[in-house]
C-alpha cells in the first residue's frame, strides 16, 4: 500500500480524539475514551476535556473531578494525568511500579528510600483518613513536624512516590491551592483486572482515542515496553483494526475519516500539553520539525497552547483572563489564510467554556 499521507493521519486523529466530528456527552466520557489526558497544567487539562465534550463548561469538568468521576494522578511515565476514577487503581498497579523504579536513583540522592516511603505512607495515610483532604502546604507541615525534611524538592518527591504506591492522588483544588486525597476515596468503585487484562484494556483505550497510531506510540504514551505494547495490540485483535502502510502497522478502531478530504479544514484552539501532540512518540504527522521550537519555546518542556488547522499544528496562542472577560493572542506560524470568523467561532466556544466573553482577538504571525 502507498504511504499514508500525513494529512490523512492527522484528519483521522482529529476525529478519534473527538476534536472534530462527534463530541463526547460528558467530561468523564472524554477521559474514558482517550484512556488518559496529560494534566501537568490544571487550566490546560480542563480545557482539553471541555473542548472534546458537547457544550461542557469549566464548572462541568470541575464537578466531574469533585464528584469522583475523574482522578488526577501520576498514572503513567511519572507524569500527571487525568484518568477515569474507576480505572485509576488498576492503571497505577500496572504502570506506576516501572516509573517508581526508574526514579529510584533520584529518590535515593534525596534520601528517600523504602523505609522512609513506608513511614510517610503511615503518617499521611492516617492524616487523610481523618481529614479526607489536605493541601500541599499542610502535608509539608505534617512531614516537618514529624522530623521529615521537605527542603530541596524532597517534599514534592515524597508526595510523588506516595502517589506511585497508590496511596494518594490530587483532589479538587481549594481556592486555587492543590489538594491531596486518598486514591481509595477518589475511586470508590474500582475495577479489578489482571496484569494482562489491564494492558489489553489500556491498548484498546489508547488506539480508540488516538488512532491511527503505532505500537511505538503506545509504548511511549503508556510507559510499557515495546514488546508489551505489541502483545497488547495483538491481544486486542477484534476490538482494534490494523492496517500495514509502508511497512508499519497502524492501529485504530476503523478507517473513519480515511477517505476524502474535508470541505473546510477543521480549526481548533488546543491547550498546551494536549494529547493531540504529546500522545505520540512520532509527532511528524501533525507538526513540522521547524515549528516544534515555537510550541516549546526554549526547549524547557513547557508546551504552548496550539492552533490546529486541518489537522496541522499551525500556530500557538495565549490567553489573558480578566475578572469578567478573556482576551486571546493568536500567532500563526506561516500566516495562513484563515477566515477570522472561524477563529472567532473557536474563541467564542472557549469563552463559553470559561463562562465569560472573549472581548479581544489579536491575530499576528508568530514572532510578529
Image: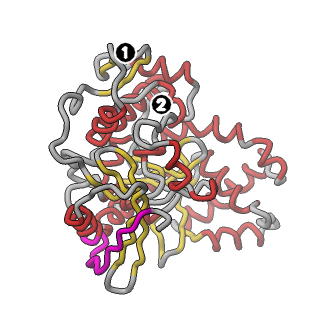
Please tell me which residue lies in front, 80 or 97.
80
Q: Quadrant of residue 227?
A: top right
Number of labels in the image equals 2
Q: Residues within 10 Å of mark 1 (few under 14, many from 20)?
A: few
Residue most extreme to the bottom? 323
Tell me residue 5's x, y (percent).
Answer: 34, 29
Q: Secondary structure at mark 1?
A: strand
Q: Is residue 102 above or below residue 30?
A: above
User: In this figure, which residue is indicated by the disc labeled 1?
Assistant: 244
Q: Is residue 80 above or below residue 209?
A: below
Please tell me which residue lies in front, 256 or 259.
259
- Residue 330 as seen in the image, left or right of residue 78: left
- Any magenta on residue 117? no
Q: Quadrant of residue 240?
A: top left
Which label lies toward us, 1 or 2?
Answer: 1
Tell me residue 265's x, y (percent).
Answer: 23, 47
Residue most extreme to the left? 263
Please tell me which residue lies in front, 353 or 316.
316
Q: Residue at x 21, y 31 (%)?
A: 256
Q: Is residue 357 above or below residue 3?
A: below
User: How far apart, in angstroms, are the residues tagged by discs 1 and 2?
Assistant: 16 Å
> Which comes sooner in the sequence, label 1 or label 2?
2
User: In this figure, which residue is indicated by the disc labeled 2?
Assistant: 218
Residue range (magenta): 351-365
Amino acid at each position: 500500500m502507498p504511504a499514508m499521507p500525513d494529512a490523512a493521519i492527522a484528519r483521522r486523529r482529529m476525529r478519534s480524539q473527538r476534536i472534530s466530528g462527534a463530541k463526547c456527552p460528558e467530561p468523564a466520557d472524554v477521559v474514558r475514551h482517550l484512556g488518559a489526558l496529560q494534566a501537568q497544567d490544571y487550566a490546560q487539562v480542563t480545557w482539553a476535556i471541555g473542548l472534546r465534550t458537547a457544550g461542557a463548561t469549566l464548572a462541568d469538568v470541575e464537578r466531574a473531578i469533585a464528584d469522583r468521576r475523574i482522578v488526577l494522578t501520576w498514572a503513567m511515565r511519572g507524569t500527571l494525568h487525568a484518568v477515569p476514577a474507576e480505572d485509576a487503581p488498576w492503571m497505577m498497579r500496572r504502570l506506576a511500579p516501572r516509573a517508581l523504579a526508574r526514579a529510584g536513583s533520584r529518590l535515593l540522592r534525596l534520601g528517600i528510600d523504602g523505609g522512609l516511603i513506608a513511614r510517610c505512607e503511615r503518617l499521611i495515610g492516617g492524616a487523610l483518613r481523618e481529614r479526607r483532604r489536605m493541601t500541599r502546604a499542610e502535608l509539608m507541615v505534617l512531614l516537618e513536624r514529624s522530623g521529615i525534611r521537605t527542603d530541596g524538592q524532597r517534599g514534592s518527591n515524597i508526595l510523588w512516590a506516595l502517589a506511585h504506591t497508590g496511596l494518594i492522588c490530587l483532589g479538587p483544588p481549594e481556592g486555587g491551592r492543590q489538594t491531596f486525597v486518598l486514591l481509595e476515596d477518589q475511586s470508590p468503585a474500582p475495577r479489578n483486572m489482571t496484569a494482562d487484562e489491564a494492558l489489553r484494556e489500556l491498548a484498546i483505550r489508547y488506539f480508540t482515542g488516538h488512532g491511527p497510531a503505532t505500537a511505538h506510540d503506545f509504548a511511549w504514551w503508556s510507559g510499557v515496553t515495546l514488546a508489551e505494547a505489541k502483545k497488547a495490540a495483538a491481544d486486542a485483535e477484534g476490538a482494534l483494526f490494523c492496517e500495514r502502510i509502508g511497512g508499519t502497522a497502524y492501529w485504530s478502531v476503523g478507517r473513519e475519516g480515511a477517505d476524502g478530504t474535508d470541505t473546510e479544514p477543521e480549526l481548533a484552539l488546543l491547550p498546551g500539553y494536549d494529547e493531540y501532540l504529546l500522545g505520540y512518540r512520532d509527532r511528524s504527522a501533525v507538526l513540522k520539525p521547524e515549528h516544534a521550537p515555537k510550541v516549546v519555546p526554549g526547549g524547557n518542556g513547557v508546551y504552548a497552547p496550539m492552533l490546529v488547522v486541518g489537522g496541522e499544528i499551525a500556530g500557538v496562542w495565549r490567553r489573558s483572563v480578566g475578572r469578567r472577560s478573556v482576551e486571546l493572542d493568536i500567532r500563526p506560524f506561516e500566516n495562513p489564510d484563515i477566515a477570522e470568523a472561524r477563529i472567532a467561532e473557536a474563541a467564542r466556544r472557549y469563552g463559553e467554556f470559561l463562562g465569560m466573553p472573549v472581548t479581544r482577538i489579536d491575530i499576528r504571525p508568530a514572532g510578529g
